[in-house]
Image (tube, rainbow, N blue to C red):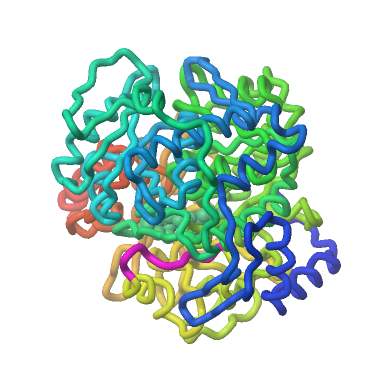
Amino acid sequence: MEKAKFYPVKGYIDFQKGATADIERFWEKEAEKLEWFKHWDKVLEWEEPFAKWFVGGKLNASYLCIDRHLYSWHKNKVALYWEDEAGNTKAYSYFQLYREVNKFASMLENLGVKKGDRVVLYLPMIPELTIAMLATVRIGAIHTVVFSGYSSQALADRINDTSAEVLIAADVGLRRGKYIPLKQIVDEALKAAPAIKKVVVIKRTKEEINMVAGRDLLYHDLIRDAKDYVEPKPMESMHPLFILYTSGTTGKPKGVVHSTGGYLVYINSTYKWVFDISDESVYWCTADVGWVTGHTSIVYAPLLHGATVLMYEGAPDYPHPDRWWEMIEKYGVTIFYTSPTAIKMFMRYGDERIKKHNLSSLKILGSVGEAINPEVWGWYYKNIGGERCPIVDTWWQTETGGIMISPVPGIELVPLKPGSATLPLPGIDAEVVDEEGNPVDTSVKGHLVIRKPWPGMLMGLYNNPERYKEAYWSKFKGLFYTGDYATKDEDGYFWLLGRTDEVLKVAGHRLGTAEVEGAVVEAPFVAEAAVIGKPDPIKGENIIVFAILKEGYKPADNLKQEIIKEVRKQIGPIATPQEIHFVDKLPKTRSGKIMRRVLKTIMMDKPVGDLSTLEDEASIDEVKAVYEEFKQVMKKKA
Ligand code: ATP
Ligand code: MG
């Protein structure tokens, strides 16, 4: 796709700069948009690396997401539509959600849960997950959602890290027409996590489950004794709202803690700017609630805005590949937010199935999780958005709580450039710096950092201030280190290039993984690619490519030559791959991100490290087999 032409958007840029110059004044105005039980005394206390926002203020997330809407026509509008892959549906009005949340909160109180206690939620994508989150924070407890696709070990690790005593689980999850025995996984996990005293089981099916006397309780029994109203407790702005573990793409997951006041202020404003969300929106984010994208986009932000949320349980392409497009048509989705990984999967299915569906309700498309390369962007824009909907490529992290770099159609739509997340949001002082922490020149690559605190910033890592300082504040003095590699173009647009610890160092040059992967997928037969650098005593590193071919293509030497040609054309001879391997699958996290560190360790014959977030073991076996075969061939040649 042609690089978009830049038209000056001076109005927005001036506004952005003004906001960022005086963050306290700016965020104070934004905070006024929420209803507070008690006004704050001080906007910001910044004692690097700890920021305290809206100090002295009190509010309640559950009240803001639900109760507030009961005094208007929102009371009887749909807050939440739920559908599973089999087509079962549920709908909750704001009032119904209010009832359920109150009962759930009362049940938690009856179990002895108090302010500050951690409650672990190991639930599939069902309305009870939203209800449980809002109920937990209603009484000032702190939720830790553990993605229900995680293994017993991953669950046990997270329980132990938070030392929670109460766990909410379901009997089963549903995926690809099969039940996933969640309660069984819980039983296994609890052997290694003995601190849990109570397990509340939400039974969805007649499947038989094991119940441990004294420990395991049925939700449907407990809820009968629950009251229908529990006061939403006024919580200090800096009271933790939740703990959430990062995806673990780069190593052991980190327990990120978010505050109540800062987080809510931040996501309330940013969802307005980025998605232009309103009470008329039907908002569908396809992420799992188990990731920060889901916390913010399926629960807190849309409900703050009185919008209608769509929640889907199941695989994207089951029982047929137009499952998602069917849903958009059926519910009249206006905002659709997904990941490049998912879009790439649908690209492989072709566009015929999409054309059958009426997607004209869509107004804004979003992308998150990884850099979206221009080819994928173009396909998404044309086939899903009908060349009508702007794509907001949103860069953020579990740590940032909300979106940091993205177009803002809710304020002013800047010209889009496929592959760029465009400009930082108002109040966000993002910069690209060199190894010394100095801003780099236009088009020079470097580290993405944030220079001033923002309300959505994490409070820290749970019970681990040292790791917090080490991970984010030790690389550069006074700058929040994101761990991402980026560049800024002549218009000040940000281009995310991959993770800094995955950067390829070839003959004195630094190349982002996203750059080289973007070039590889320009070859018309490549569906997806991952690149890594393999240490080389002379060159620094050699570039190794793993590529998945599109349907109808078979691995062949001439395809390797084509890929090499493409990379040389797009980037230059410096980036010429030394090895190219064709695979059917790439190792990915459960959230759909490529685990390049795993590829790298296999290629270096080293142990693969923490695999708790890996989606499919088979992907590793395949890479190992492909590599073994390659080594044999090389041996013979030698
Ligand atoms: P861990 O920190 O445990 O390695 P993770 O970084 O994958 O896991 P998340 O917080 O879920 O965990 O992901 C944030 C990261 O995802 C960002 O730092 C960035 O690398 C990538 N990312 C998210 N959105 C985008 C985007 N729009 N463009 C490019 N990269 C993105
Ligand atoms: Mg990270």
Ligand 2 occupies quarter? bottom left
Q: Residue furthest left?
A: 191
Q: State how many labels appear.
A: 0
Give the camera-side residue of 558 and 357: 357
Q: In the image, 272: left or right of 548?
A: right
Q: Main secondary structure of the magenta part?
A: loop
| Magenta span contains residue 573 | no
Residue 286 in percent (x, y) is at 54, 36
Tell me the quarter of the image containing the C terminus: bottom left
544 vs 208: above or below = below
Q: In the image, 609: left or right of 447?
A: left
Residue 15 in percent (x, y) is at 80, 69
Give the residue at x 68% y 55%: 34
Give the residue at x 66% y 65%: 39
Q: Is residue 549 visible?
A: no
Q: Is residue 244 visible?
A: yes
Give the camera-side residue of 622 and 364: 364
Give the camera-side residue of 468 and 307: 307
Give the residue at x 26% y 43%: 620
Residue stretch rendered in magenta on the structure: 456-464
Give the camera-side residue of 141 and 345: 141
Residue 343 in percent (x, y) is at 55, 37
User: On the image, which quarter does residue 89 sit in?
Assistant: top right
Q: In the image, 364: left or right of 602?
A: right
Residue 296 in percent (x, y) is at 55, 48
Give the residue at x 20% y 40%: 189
